[in-house]
Image (spheres, rainbow, N blue to C red):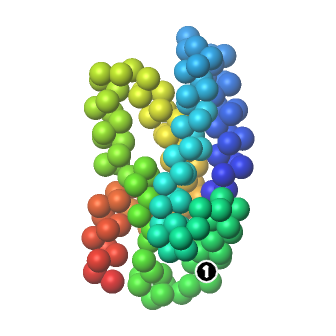
């Protein structure tokens, strides 16, 4: 899903949570920021491939990758190497959950990430991406290694 939709929906959900639940404005802002800043991990694979950190070019790169995926047949999709995006896997979420036991602010970060991931999963269903791509980065690594 495009970052602008993550920002818009993250803002709407954060405002609704602020109005409905006893959270502070700072906590709502943390939820909002986490709902789209999680995508910073996309710069890792992009930089590794291009040695460029231009956000506009990175966005174009991922849009082109998505268009390429849509054109692939089932066999081509099975051989596709998926990006390792470390903040999108449950491995990272477990670390945040452990941190939340010691620092409650991480609960709000996790909530923002949950908002983001729901949107990503909807997009994955639409595009017929395999579920593991944004659930377990260990699984992505192991599957890429076999290809």
Q: Nearer the viewer, residue 125 or 45?
A: 45
Give left or right: position of 30 versus 64: left
- Along the line of sight, which residue is nearer the eye, 79 or 3? 3
Using the image, determine if residue 32 lies above or below residue 46.
above
Residue 22 visible at all: yes
**Residue at point 64% right, 31% down?**
13
Quarter that holds the N terminus: bottom right
Along the line of sight, which residue is nearer the eye, 3 or 76?
3
Q: Splitting the image into 4 quarters, where does residue 24 fall?
A: top right
Quadrant of residue 20 in the image? top right
Tell me if residue 63 can be seen.
no
- Of the pair 78 and 65, the residue shown nearer to us: 65
Crowding around mark 1 (Cα neighbors within 10 Å: few <14, some 14 to 19, many 20+) is few
Residue drawn 34% across and 75% down? Answer: 144
Q: Which residue is mark 1?
A: 68
Q: Secondary structure at mark 1?
A: helix
**Residue 125, percent across and down?**
54, 62
Q: Residue at x 27, y 70 (%)?
A: 142
């Amino acid at each position: 899903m495009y970052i602008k939709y993550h920002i818009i929906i993250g803002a709407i959900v954060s405002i609704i949570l602020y109005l409905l639940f006893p959270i502070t404005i700072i906590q709502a802002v943390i939820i909002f920021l986490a709902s789209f800043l999680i995508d910073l991990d996309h710069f890792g694979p992009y930089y590794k491939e291009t040695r460029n950190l231009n956000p506009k070019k990175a966005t174009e790169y991922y849009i082109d990758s998505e268009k390429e995926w849509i054109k692939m047949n089932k066999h081509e999709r099975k051989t596709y190497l998926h990006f390792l995006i470390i903040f999108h896997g449950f491995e990272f979420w477990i670390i945040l959950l452990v941190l939340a036991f010691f620092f409650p602010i991480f609960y709000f970060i996790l909530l923002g990430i949950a908002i983001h991931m729901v949107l990503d999963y909807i997009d994955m269903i639409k595009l017929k991406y395999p579920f593991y791509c944004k659930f377990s980065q260990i699984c992505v690594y192991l599957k890429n290694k076999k290809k």
